[in-house]
Structure formats: structure tokens, C-alpha cells
């Protein structure tokens, strides 16, 4: 198949998933064309079956906001015609599904029928898409998609609750490449981060309020009162300054390391003994899955798609949003002795295997083939 993929090319989960999906599809023999405003961060190479087409947006003083969706849909039409694209897969509803619909309509004028698959990832539905300024257009775009998928059952139900959706929504979960995960700690140089007697706790996010960074700090504070530990905070965002200030205020700054955005996530997870994700809302929880795949158990909130990813008593534990004390107690129960920690590490990695990319990509291929077969009728 010749497939065009539209995504945000940044560190966000939707862009990562879209890029990894495209790479995996190319390895399976499909011709993949990424169409976006810059090369996706996870796309380290261009191979025989992988192409990148940059969307240029000219800056005109007339426009207060540059019309990216117009430039995107025009570039898509050009790419489809030039390369014979058979299918369009857009990730994140805004503005990609809307631009995709306009692409379909323009191509129809030339007698070209282009099926469109739309994958919903989370904030495109629960936060941005539900805003009154966008809701009508998002509803329209979803309903005009040939196939709609969501990354969790929770997100599917949120979409059906918030929007007047007339088309079926298929749940295809996010995934991880298990074969690419570190299998041991022999080269992790753990001593760079902590002493041999200390546990290493990690949090990775964009430090937005929804991630409840204050809870990460307070859960760690409670853990550190019980056992020797260090906290690694990975990411950048509006809550970082508060978190650093709070760590100094409560006297744990010497035990916390803020490393900013990092391209060495695998290495950091290799150091880690426990992952904290106390979010207000997570449509899936890709960061938790990446931790589990590296053998790192997870303490998370019991919200959104997290219970579909983090299995209580197996890959870690879940607590109610904001219940810092319960999270800390469950964390200590995992970290208190080497035998328990080793068991949870092994269980976490085994549980993550059900989300292996080799199991998920065929689900997308089946959906693609189904929509292409329907188009031929």
C-alpha cells in the first residue's frame, strides 16, 4: 500500500506513535509518505520505503494566524497525485482531519477517491477539540472520516460522550517496540545517578498542569522518608519552575535531578526502579508503557486509559487522582526489598509485551485493507 501519514512532528505522544507506525509499515513493505511541517523527531532516517514531504507556510502580514491547514491540504493533494497515494492516515483531529477532508474533496474534483483514517489521541478530543471554537469542525471531520480509531476504550467513550459521532470508532491501542528495549542493566552506569543503596524514581512528561507535577514531588518526598531514593524529572513545561522551587522549599532538592527534554529516554529508564505518572487525565499513558517495556513498574492515577495499560498488582499500582499518600505507600511496597522489586520489574516487561508493535501494526493493516476494499465496491 502507498500511505500518506499526517502528524505533529514533535515530542508529543501522537507524533511519536504516528512516526513509529510509519517506520514499522515501511519495514513491512508499504510505501510511506510523511507530510508535515518538519521531519518527525523519531524519523532518524529516510529509507527506500519512507519519504518526507515538508509543508511550507508562507508568512503574509495579512494573516494574524498563518493558514497551515490550507497549506497542508494543498501539499497532500500534490503528494497524492505525484506518488499515487492510496490511503491517508491522519493523527490528531485538529487540524489534520479537517485538512484531510478538504484534501479528499479537492481530489474528488479530479476523479480521485482517497480513503481517510483518523486516529484520535487524546487532547485533540478532551481538551482542544471540545472547545466551542473547534467542536463543530471536529465533529464534522470525524464523521467524514472513512475509518476512525482511538488509542483507548476510555478515549472512545469520551469522544462519544462529547461529540455527536455517527461513525463507528475502533480501538487500536498505542504500542511499543519490545525488541528495541534494553534487556539488562549491565551498561546503564547507574552509579552516575545514585548510590548502590538508593532507588531511582523517574517521571517523564511535558510538565503541564494535567500531569500533576506537584503530586510527583510529594509522592517522592514520602518515599524518600521511608527508603533512600533519588528522583529524575525528565521534560520541560510550565510546571517545572514550581517543581524546582517546591523541592528546595521542602528540602529534597539534593535528591532530585531535572534533566529537561532528553533523547536518552531508554538510558534513563534503564537506571530507573519506579515510574510515577499521577496525571489528572491520560487518554492512554504511552510514557507508562515505555517504562514498563523497559522493566520499570508504574505507580499511576486510576484515570482515563491508564487502567487499560497499567495492571494493578502486576505492572504496578493505581491510585485515585490526588491521593499522594496511597501512591507513596504502594511505591514503597514495591521498592522495599530487592525480591519484590525484581518481581514487579519482570511482570511489567511481560505485561508490556501485549502492546508490542508486532501485534498492533497488523490491526492497522487490516483496517487499511478493509477501507480500500470498500472503496473498490
Image (cartoon, rainbow, N blue to C red):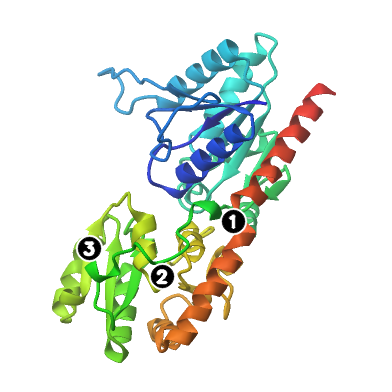
In what element is the residue under mark 2? strand
Q: CA distance from mark 1 to mark 3?
A: 31 Å
Q: Are marks 2 and 1 in contact (CB under 8 Å)?
A: no
- Which residue position is annotated with label 1? 155
Identify the mark at residue 344; answer none if there is no mark: none
C-alpha gap between disc 2 and disc 1: 23 Å
331 to 52, vertically: above or below: below
User: Which residue does the numbered mark 3 point to in the structure image?
Assistant: 258
User: Measured along the vertical axis of the image, is residue 366 above or below residue 312?
Assistant: above
Q: Earlier in the sequence, mark 2 or mark 1?
A: 1
Q: Which residue is mark 2?
A: 275
Figure label count: 3
Q: Is residue 345 visible?
A: yes
The residue sitting at 33% across, 63% down in the picture is 188
Specify whether residue 319 is in view: no
Percent across and percent down for residue 197 are 28, 84
Q: Give the position of the C terminus as an image quadrant.
A: top right
The mark lying in front, picked from 1 and 3, is 3
* Classed neighbour count for the residue bearing mark 2: other residues with Cα under 10 Å, few (<14), some (14–19), many (≥20): many
The x and y percentages for residue 155 are 59, 56
In the rendered image, which quarter contains the N terminus?
top right
Q: CA distance from mark 2 to mark 3?
A: 15 Å
Amino acid at each position: 500500500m502507498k500511505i500518506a501519514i499526517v502528524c505533529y512532528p514533535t515530542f508529543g505522544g501522537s507524533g511519536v506513535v504516528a512516526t513509529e507506525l510509519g517506520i514499522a509499515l515501511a519495514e513491512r513493505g508499504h510505501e510511506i509518505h510523511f507530510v508535515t511541517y518538519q521531519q518527525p523527531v523519531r524519523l532518524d532516517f529516510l529509507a527506500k520505503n519512507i519519504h518526507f514531504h515538508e509543508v511550507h507556510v508562507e508568512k503574509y502580514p495579512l494573516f494574524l494566524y498563518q493558514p497551515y491547514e490550507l497549506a497542508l491540504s494543498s501539499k497532500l493533494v500534490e503528494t497524492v497525485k505525484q506518488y499515487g497515494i492510496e490511503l491517508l492516515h491522519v493523527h490528531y483531529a485538529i487540524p489534520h482531519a479537517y485538512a484531510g477532508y478538504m484534501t479528499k474533496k479537492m481530489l474528488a474534483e479530479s476523479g480521485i477517491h482517497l480513503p481517510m483514517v483518523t486516529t484520535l489521541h487524546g487532547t485533540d478530543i478532551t481538551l482542544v477539540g471540545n472547545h466551542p471554537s473547534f467542536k463543530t469542525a471536529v465533529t464534522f471531520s470525524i464523521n467524514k472520516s472513512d475509518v476512525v480509531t482511538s488509542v483507548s476504550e476510555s478515549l472512545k467513550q469520551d469522544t462519544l460522550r462529547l461529540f455527536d459521532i455517527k461513525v463507528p470508532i475502533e480501538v487500536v491501542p498505542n504500542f511499543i517496540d519490545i525488541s528495541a528495549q534494553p534487556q539488562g542493566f549491565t551498561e546503564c552506569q547507574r552509579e552516575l545517578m545514585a548510590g548502590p543503596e538508593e532507588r531511582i524514581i523517574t517521571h517523564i512528561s511535558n510538565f503541564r498542569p494535567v500531569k500533576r507535577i506537584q503530586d510527583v514531588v510529594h509522592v517522592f518526598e514520602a518515599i524518600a522518608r521511608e527508603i533512600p531514593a533519588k528522583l529524575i524529572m525528565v521534560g520541560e513545561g510550565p510546571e517545572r519552575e514550581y517543581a524546582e522551587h517546591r523541592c528546595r522549599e521542602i528540602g529534597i532538592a539534593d535528591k532530585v535531578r531535572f534533566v529537561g527534554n532528553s533523547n536518552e529516554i531508554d538510558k534513563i529508564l534503564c537506571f530507573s526502579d519506579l515510574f510515577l505518572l499521577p496525571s489528572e487525565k491520560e487518554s492512554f499513558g504511552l510514557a507508562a508503557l515505555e517504562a514498563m517495556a523497559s522493566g520499570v513498574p508504574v505507580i499511576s492515577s486510576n484515570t482515563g486509559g491508564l487502567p487499560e495499560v497499567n495492571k494493578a498488582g502486576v505492572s504496578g499500582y493505581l491510585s485515585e487522582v490526588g491521593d499522594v499518600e496511597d501512591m507513596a505507600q504502594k511505591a514503597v511496597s514495591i521498592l522495599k526489598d530487592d525480591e519484590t522489586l525484581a518481581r514487579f520489574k519482570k511482570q511489567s516487561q511481560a505485561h508490556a509485551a501485549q502492546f508490542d508493535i508486532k501485534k498492533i501494526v497488523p490491526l492497522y493493516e487490516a483496517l487499511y485493507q478493509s477501507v480500500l476494499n470498500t472503496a473498490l465496491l
